[in-house]
Structure formats: structure tokens, C-alpha cells
């Protein structure tokens, strides 16, 4: 067996067909699409990506790298088809294995192939728009995202969290982002001990800013029938008003491991 390193730029919406002596292992992945791109292997869903959290490359305007799949790498066995269902371009890094005559796919890759349709990296996104000409009152808290997995599901958010904002501004000490699990805050609730929650600026991707927010060091686990809520609070001390005829909005993207129990 020969192992070849790959770095491919592939067209979303195109179905690819591996040769009968090839095995594809996808370790990292990204896209330039601002809409969902579904990963389909042998016609089955194995997660999805979007450029906001899995860009096609890191550059001077976006510090985020390709999404590293780590232990949840994706496997396309020999002779099977795969497709990135969506638009734009998808970049993948990993290995292409060339099997010798009579050689079979390694057992660890077979195991991951079978598991990858029930446990994979995924993102969740939600948007809160306050409405045209609606001001955001000082001290007011709004809900951006609410997630309650089914009984046989589990989420572990252990990766990038990104927020996009409109008509709020990018200054620090203006908006606090607060995470709740079953309505119990996971971070500082009152300002007396420091800033409430986590400052929104930490979640923004800005040109010239060489850092981004991740939950890699302190993941949030949400088992089935538990609720995760993400809220934003105006901590600026005064109302935030949009330009006339416009609105305030917040969009969040959270990357984590999705797992579904079967049987």
C-alpha cells in the first residue's frame, strides 16, 4: 500500500468516484461557500461545512484555518462515490491510499467508515434580528440560539464559535455573550465579579485580528433532552440603535461533534 498526501480543490455539486484500488481519507476540510455544503459519502450524510467556520484557506482577513476533523476523519473506501452537496469549491487535505493487488482497506479505516454517519463534526447556526428601527435597550438580553437534542442524540461543542453582527459595532464592553445549559448560566452572570459572560468581541473575525474563539479547552456537552441556550446582553450602559430603516442582528456559528446512538 502506498500513501499519498493530497491537497485538493473540488467542485461542490459534483459526484466523484474512487477507483477500485483507492481509499480516500479526509483529515481537514474547508469551503468558500457562504451557504451549507453537505458531505455525502456513498449517498449518506456525514456532516456539513460553511465558510464562516471552515474557510477554504486562512488569510489576512480571516484567521480561521481549515476545519481539522482530528479523530473524526472521513473515509471513502475503494469504488465508492462521494459528493459535496452545495455550491462553490471545497478543499480537502488528507491521504489517498493506493492498495496493492489483493490488499484490503485497514481495519481502523473500516471502523471509522461505519461510524462516520453517526458521529461527525457539524455546525449549528441561528440568527436573531430585532426588526427594522428597533433599538436594543441597555441591560436587555436577547436569545440567539436554542438547542435541545433528541433523546438519542448528543452534541459536544469543542471547536470554533463565531458571531456576525449588523449595526452593533465591534467595540469591546458593548455586548456580552452568555451560555446557558438548562437555563443555568455556564459563565459569570453578574458584573460584580468581572464582565458578564464573554465579551462579543472575542467571537468576531476581523481583518488584522490574529485570534479567534474556540471551546477546545472547555467543551460544552449537551446530552439528549438537555437544552443549550446562547443569549446576548447589551452591557454598554445605553441603548443601541440601528440606522433609520435598518435593523440590529446577530448570527452565531458553533462547531462541535454530533453523535446519534443507534440500535
Image (cartoon, helix red, strand yellow):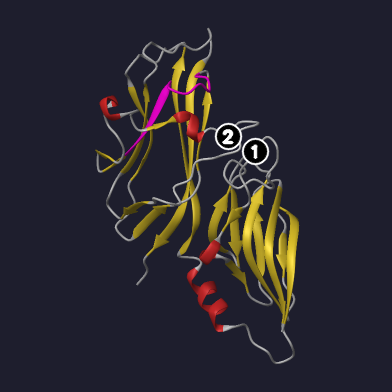
Assess disc 1: are there few (<14), some (14-19) or many (≥20) residues with their C-alpha within 10 Å of its C-alpha.
Answer: some
Q: How much space separates mark 2 and mark 1, taking CA atoms?
A: 6 Å
Image quadrant containing the N terminus: bottom right
Q: Residue at x 54, y 63 (%)?
A: 70
Residue 177 in magenta stretch: yes
Q: Residue 202: x and y, percent?
A: 48, 34
Against 114, is 175 above or below? above
Residue of label 1: 62
Furthest residue to the top? 244
Residue of label 2: 205
Image quadrant containing the C terminus: bottom left
Q: Which numbered disc, 2 or 1, marks the residue that appears first in the sequence?
A: 1
Furthest residue to the bottom? 102
Residue 176 in magenta stretch: yes
Q: Nearer the viewer, residue 59 or 155?
A: 59
Q: Which residues are magenta?
A: 168-179
User: Would you say the residues marked 2 and 1 are in contact, meaning their CB atoms lie under 8 Å apart?
Assistant: yes
Q: In the drawing, does residue 240 fall left or right of residue 73? A: left
Against 241, is 11 above or below? below
Q: Quadrant of residue 186?
A: top left
Q: Residue 89: x and y, percent?
A: 72, 49
Q: In the drawing, does residue 54 fall left or right of residue 14? A: left
Q: Residue at x 39, y 54 (%)?
A: 155
Q: Residue 9: x and y, percent?
A: 75, 55
Q: Residue 159: x and y, percent?
A: 48, 50
Q: Secondary structure at mark 1?
A: loop
Amino acid at each position: 500500500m502506498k500513501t499519498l498526501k493530497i491537497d485538493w480543490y473540488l467542485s461542490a455539486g459534483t459526484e466523484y468516484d474512487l477507483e477500485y484500488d483507492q481509499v480516500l481519507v479526509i483529515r481537514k476540510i474547508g469551503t468558500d461557500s457562504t451557504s451549507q455544503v453537505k458531505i455525502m459519502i456513498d449517498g449518506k450524510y456525514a456532516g456539513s461545512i460553511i465558510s464562516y467556520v471552515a474557510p477554504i484557506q486562512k488569510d489576512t482577513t480571516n484567521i480561521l484555518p481549515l476545519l481539522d476533523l482530528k479523530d473524526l476523519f472521513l473515509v471513502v473506501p475503494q469504488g465508492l462515490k462521494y459528493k459535496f452537496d452545495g455550491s462553490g469549491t471545497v478543499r480537502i487535505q488528507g491521504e489517498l491510499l493506493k492498495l496493492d493487488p489483493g490488499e484490503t482497506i485497514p481495519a481502523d479505516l473500516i471502523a471509522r467508515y461505519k461510524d462516520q454517519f453517526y458521529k461527525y463534526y457539524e455546525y449549528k447556526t441561528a440568527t436573531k434580528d430585532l426588526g427594522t428601527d428597533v433599538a436594543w435597550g441597555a441591560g436587555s438580553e436577547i436569545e440567539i440560539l436554542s438547542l435541545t437534542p433528541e433523546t438519542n442524540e448528543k452534541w459536544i461543542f469543542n471547536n470554533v464559535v463565531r458571531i456576525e453582527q449588523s449595526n452593533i459595532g465591534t467595540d469591546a464592553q458593548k455586548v456580552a455573550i452568555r451560555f446557558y445549559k438548562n437555563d443555568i448560566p455556564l459563565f459569570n452572570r453578574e458584573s460584580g465579579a468581572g464582565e458578564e459572560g464573554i465579551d462579543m468581541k472575542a467571537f468576531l473575525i476581523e481583518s488584522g485580528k490574529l485570534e479567534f474563539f474556540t471551546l477546545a479547552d472547555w467543551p460544552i456537552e449537551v446530552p439528549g433532552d438537555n437544552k443549550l441556550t446562547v443569549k446576548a446582553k447589551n452591557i454598554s450602559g445605553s441603548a443601541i440603535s440601528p440606522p433609520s430603516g435598518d435593523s440590529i442582528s446577530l448570527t452565531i456559528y458553533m462547531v462541535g461533534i454530533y453523535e446519534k446512538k443507534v440500535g
